[in-house]
Amino acid sequence: MSAPNDDATAAPQPFLFPVPVTIGRGEGAQTVEALTFRAPKGRELRKVGSLFSVSPSGDVSPNIDACLRLAADLGGVPPAVIDELDARTANRLAWHIAGFFGEQA
């Protein structure tokens, strides 16, 4: 993840996540090679709760459930698209979503 952004006026930039997914079903289905995720709004963060989990030993990691729920909104795709990602890809995506807040959230 990138370092925290100390410039309060700079908005986080959208990022491209290279993963082929199919959106929709049947004849109207569309396959895309990558998804673009925009930065979250405050109301979206309130909706999903904390994007981070802290272990008893103090290790910080993404809250997978919250990050993936937010990913559907930020990527403009149905939640079912995110739900069908394999576990490794879903974990990578969760780290990218959490990365909007830098290493020290």
Image (cartoon, rainbow, N blue to C red):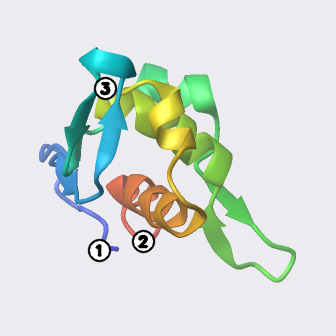
Q: Which residue is mark 3?
A: 76
How far apart marks 2 and 1 lie (CA) works out to 6 Å
Asked whether residue 67 is in view, the answer is: yes
Q: Are marks 2 and 1 in contact (CB under 8 Å)?
A: yes
N-term mark: 2 or 3: 3
How far apart marks 2 and 3 lie (CA) works out to 25 Å
Question: Left or right: 1 with respect to 69?
Answer: left
Tell me the tag on residue 103: 2
Q: Residue at x 43, y 58 (%)?
A: 93
Question: Left or right: 60 with respect to 39?
Answer: right
Q: Which residue is mark 1?
A: 3
Q: Is residue 57 above or below residue 53?
A: below
Taking depth in this image into account, of 47 and 35 the one nearest to the observer is 35
Taking depth in this image into account, of 29 and 5 the one nearest to the observer is 29
Q: Quadrant of residue 74?
A: top left
Pointer 2 local density, CA inside 10 Å: few below 14, some 14–19, many at least 20: few
Q: Are marks 3 and 1 in contact (CB under 8 Å)?
A: no
Q: Quadrant of residue 83?
A: top right
- Single out the mark in the foreground, 3 or 1: 3
At mark 3, the secondary structure is: loop
Amino acid type at mark 1:
Ala
At mark 1, the secondary structure is: loop
Question: At which x and y percent is residue 41?
Answer: 35, 27
Q: Residue at x 28, y 52 (%)?
A: 20
